């Protein structure tokens, strides 16, 4: 966009000269937009702020003389200009020159985009904001992601429910349609209120993922010893009186989601993502544990809200939990969402599934396995998804410099071919080749790390398997390529994409028939995958972005059911193929990442679930 629109950057000040100076200087010195002005509205500062502002050339200063509050103070600035406006807190700092161009380009990319916020990092560099949502019943507004290490998450432009107004671009057409900020508020909640009003007027609200601003957070409140609690509570009460009915009508479907919520488990990760997506899609979710022994305490604000919702026996119940815990609950309609790691479903699980009203599985392979195992209920494919805000090619990589890196995350035990991978890798590559295998050894879902204190290396023991002794049994000869073990580092779930992106190729060695999520996660990050040619992963194998390894079916721990053993010689060949053709494979994986990001995300999964819920209620 070369037709730059004039824009007024409005900065509201109330003492805090140190931060105001940093803000104003960063705007004036770093901004490259050719048609912007700076309007500073002062709310009665007494610390020399006004004298400082009057000494700065090229800005317009408006003195209110008294503290009018955030809303009325900003409205003075909004009413003083006929341009588009950017509201910018005086405790923010501009860190990229083209921030204003990018915000303006986004709001003018479509006539119905009216408001754009941006990513905000705090003084410690943590990403605190990339959009907001309003959870019920607390109506205590929350920010995505709320304080994570910035690894490049939320870098795409996204439509959101709201943005905080520490930095926000408001198109003049929005102001003309709905007026300035609502002066019923003094401070707090006015930003969400304004975003909702804009939406009712036909405008969309976005977070601009390509713009990041530093926000030192609540400086004026702290410096001026403002009564945060009273102001916040008063504004919250006003907001609820205005918008409670809107939020009540927003939810069109209801469901109870029952699962295992061990903090580091795959079941928790999947449940967390799909519950958030369902809430955004207008489904009122109630959260319960499928185990009476599990106490639900989350570090996720929304999940903590949803667990407190009333149990409603009229809600359909989705049980996403281990097979032995799948039994009809007190809902009027019971749905099992499940899969098998084997060639089929165990007889006892198939019997329990036939007691449900319907069954969901994540892939076509799982549907056939259920049917072949005697499940007579209607079976629907509801695939797992990926969070495209984290799993994308631009996520931060911590790659080993100059080394081709294979990465595998697995458990060490009977459910994994990890030993076969170590053997294949060390047989195929020697120490003179610039290649390494990173093997991340996981614990089971919710399992605590058990340390063998008889040795000083602290190797973990899983299911009576001592990983150190098992590796020593392989008897790797000297002069072979390096294998690096990452022993249960308890990496936060949101940082897992960085592990994948740090690899040149991901290797999946689980014997399970359900590896689709590992394949999707890797491809979404633009990283090629080697995976056993079996089960749900088979539909992704194309010989380039996803390479299949021949395998044989062998007896599993469940009598009469099979899982796989990877062929070591074929695994060696596929490792070599990936090493020799690394750039070609990564290019193909990048192509696939675009497709997966557009189709296999949790919003699409939520849409499928909503369609099923609507069909149930007809």
Image: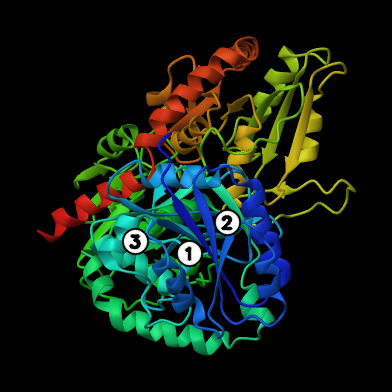
Q: Is residue 156 left or right of residue 441?
A: left
Q: Residue furthest right?
A: 456
Q: Is residue 341 above or below residue 568?
A: below
- Residue at horizontal 36 percent and vertical 35 percent from the top: 598
Residues packed near mark 1 inside 10 Å, few (<14), some (14 to 19) or many (20 plus) = many
- Residue at horizontal 43 percent and vertical 55 percent from the top: 271
Which numbered disc, 3 or 1, marks the residue closer to the eye? 1
Q: Which mark is residue 279?
A: 3
Frontmost residue, 311 versus 533: 311
Q: Is residue 255 left or right of residue 62?
A: left
Quarter assignment of residue 538: top left
Q: Is residue 265 left or right of residue 354?
A: right
Of the image marks 2 and 3, the number of the one nearer the N terminus: 2
Residues packed near mark 3 inside 10 Å, few (<14), some (14 to 19) or many (20 plus) = many
- Residue at horizontal 52 percent and vertical 18 percent from the top: 587
Q: Which residue has dot 2 on it?
A: 120
Q: Which residue has dot 1 on it?
A: 164
3D distance between C-alphas at marks 1 and 2: 10 Å
- Residue at horizontal 80 percent and vertical 37 percent from the top: 469
3D distance between C-alphas at marks 3 and 1: 20 Å
Frontmost residue, 143 versus 533: 143
Residues packed near mark 2 inside 10 Å, few (<14), some (14 to 19) or many (20 plus) = many
Determine whether the residue tagged by mark 2 lies in a helix, strand or loop. Answer: strand
Frontmost residue, 74 versus 248: 74
């Amino acid at each position: 966009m070369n037709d730059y629109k004039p824009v007024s950057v409005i900065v509201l000040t109330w003492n805090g000269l140190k931060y105001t100076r940093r803000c104003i200087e960063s705007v004036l010195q770093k901004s490259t937009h050719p048609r912007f002005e700076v309007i500073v509205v002062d709310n009665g500062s007494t610390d020399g702020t006004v004298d400082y502002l009057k000494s700065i050339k090229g800005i317009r200063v408006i003195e209110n003389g008294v503290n009018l509050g955030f809303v009325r103070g900003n409205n003075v600035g909004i009413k003083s200009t006929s341009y588009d406006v950017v509201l910018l807190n005086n405790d923010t700092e501009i860190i990229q020159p083209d921030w204003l161009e990018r915000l303006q380009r986004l709001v003018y990319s479509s006539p119905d985009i009216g408001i754009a916020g941006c990513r905000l990092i705090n003084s410690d560099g943590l990403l605190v904001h990339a959009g907001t949502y309003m959870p019920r019943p607390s109506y205590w507004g929350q920010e995505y992601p709320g304080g994570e290490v910035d690894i490049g998450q939320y870098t795409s432009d996204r439509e959101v429910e709201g943005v905080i107004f520490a930095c926000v671009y408001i198109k003049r057409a929005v102001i003309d349609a709905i007026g300035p900020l609502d002066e019923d508020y003094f401070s707090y909640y006015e930003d969400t209120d304004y975003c909702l009003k804009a939406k009712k007027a036909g405008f969309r609200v976005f977070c601009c993922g390509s713009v990041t601003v530093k926000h030192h957070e609540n400086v004026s409140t702290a410096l001026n010893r403002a009564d945060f609690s009273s102001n916040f509570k008063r504004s919250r009460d006003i907001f609820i009186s205005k918008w409670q009915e809107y939020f009540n009508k927003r939810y069109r479907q209801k469901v109870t989601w029952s699962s295992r919520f061990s903090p580091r488990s795959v079941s928790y990760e999947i449940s967390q993502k799909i519950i958030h997506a369902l809430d955004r899609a207008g489904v009122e979710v109630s959260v319960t544990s499928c185990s009476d022994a599990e106490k639900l305490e989350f570090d996720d604000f929304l999940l903590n809200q949803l667990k407190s919702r009333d149990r409603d026996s009229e809600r359909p119940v989705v049980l996403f939990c281990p097979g032995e815990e799948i039994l009809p609950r007190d809902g009027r309609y019971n749905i099992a969402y499940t899969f098998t790691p084997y060639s089929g479903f165990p007889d006892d699980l198939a019997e329990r599934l036939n007691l449900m009203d319907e069954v969901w599985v994540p892939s076509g392979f799982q549907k056939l396995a259920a049917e072949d195992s005697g499940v007579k209920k209607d079976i629907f494919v509801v695939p797992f998804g990926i969070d495209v805000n984290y799993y994308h090619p631009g996520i931060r990589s911590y790659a080993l410099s100059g080394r081709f890196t294979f990465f595998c995350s697995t458990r060490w035990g009977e459910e994994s071919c990890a030993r076969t991978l170590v053997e294949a890798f060390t047989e195929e590559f020697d120490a003179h080749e610039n290649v390494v295998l990173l093997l991340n050894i996981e614990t089971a879902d919710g399992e605590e790390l058990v340390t063998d204190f008889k040795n000083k290396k602290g190797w973990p023991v899983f299911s009576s398997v001592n990983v150190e002794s098992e590796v020593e049994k392989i008897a790797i000869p000297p002069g072979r390529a390096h294998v690096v073990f990452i022993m249960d580092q308890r990496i936060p779930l949101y940082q897992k994409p960085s592990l994948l992106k740090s690899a040149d190729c991901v290797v999946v060695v689980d014997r399970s028939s359900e590896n689709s999520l590992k394949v999707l996660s890797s491809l979404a990050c633009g990283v090629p995958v080697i995976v056993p040619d079996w089960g749900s992963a088979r539909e992704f194998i194309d010989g380039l972005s996803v390479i299949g390894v021949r395998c044989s079916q062998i007896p599993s721990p469940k009598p009469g059911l099979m899982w796989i053993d990877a062929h070591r010689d074929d695994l060696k060949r596929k490792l070599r193929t990936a090493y020799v053709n690394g750039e070609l494979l990564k290019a193909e994986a990048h192509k696939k990442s675009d497709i997966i990001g557009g189709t296999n995300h949790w919003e699409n999964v939520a849409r499928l679930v909503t369609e099923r819920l609507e069909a149930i209620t007809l």
